Amino acid sequence: MMPRLVAAALVLGVMVFPDAGVLVVMCAIAAVVAAQIAVEVVVASRADREVEERVSDLVTALQGSCAHLDVATWSPPGERVCTECIALDLTWVRLRMCLECGHVGCCDDSRARHARQHHNETGHLTLAGIEPGEGWGYCYLDDVIDTDWARTRR
């Protein structure tokens, strides 16, 4: 806001001197606008860097390991279907497997969220993404994603 106030004051200051030629007035206004744009670009780039740093810090905090994932073991899922969704005639988006009992349920992007429902009902803390290309582990309690979890346990 401050750069705009300075720009407005300078433009008004130029208008106080009506004897100055039109070219001088136009050049002064162009200089003020250019300076304002430069200031806004600098401020925006600083804000973008701050946002990137905050996102990076958040991702770093969420990635890693926790004691619950460190002791969880991998066993291949029996079926790669959400049986609860099938019983309700629903479709799912992706599947998750409980690392404590092997229950397979649909993810939070699915309508029924059976993996989370399983966690809420049983208190089981860890799950893994079992879709092709996935293989991360997640701990509900610590809210930690370990992107390398499955690779070290298969």
Image (cartoon, grey):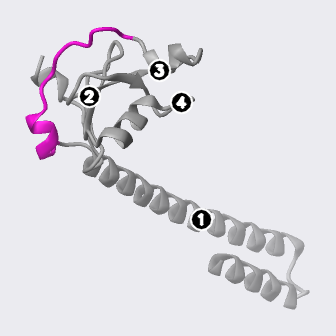
Quadrant assignment, res 79 = top left
In primary-sequence order, the first of circles 4 and 1 is 1
Q: Measured along the vertical axis of the image, is residue 32 above or below residue 148?
A: below
Magenta span: chief secondary structure: loop
Badge 2 marks a residue whose secondary structure is loop
Q: Amino acid at mark 3?
A: Glu
What residue would you read off at disc 2? 136
Badge 1 marks a residue whose secondary structure is helix
Q: Are marks 4 and 1 in contact (CB under 8 Å)?
A: no
Q: Nearer the viewer, mark 4 or mark 3?
A: 3
Residue drawn at (66%, 77%) of the image: 1
In primary-sequence order, the first of circles 2 and 1 is 1
Residue drawn at (40%, 52%) of the image: 52
Q: Nearer the viewer, mark 2 or mark 1?
A: 2
Which residue lies most toward the bottom here? 16
Q: Amino acid at mark 4?
A: Ala
Q: Measured along the vertical axis of the image, is residue 18 above or below residue 71?
A: below
Q: Measured along the vertical axis of the image, is residue 138 above or below residue 92?
A: below
What residue would you read off at disc 3? 84
Neighbourhood count class around disc 2 (C-alpha, 10 Å): few under 14, some 14–19, many 20 upward: some
| Residues shaded magenta | 65-80
Q: Nearer the viewer, residue 18 or 75?
A: 75
Q: x%, y% of residue 53? A: 35, 55
Q: Nearer the viewer, mark 3 or mark 1?
A: 3
Q: CA distance from mark 2 to mark 1?
A: 41 Å
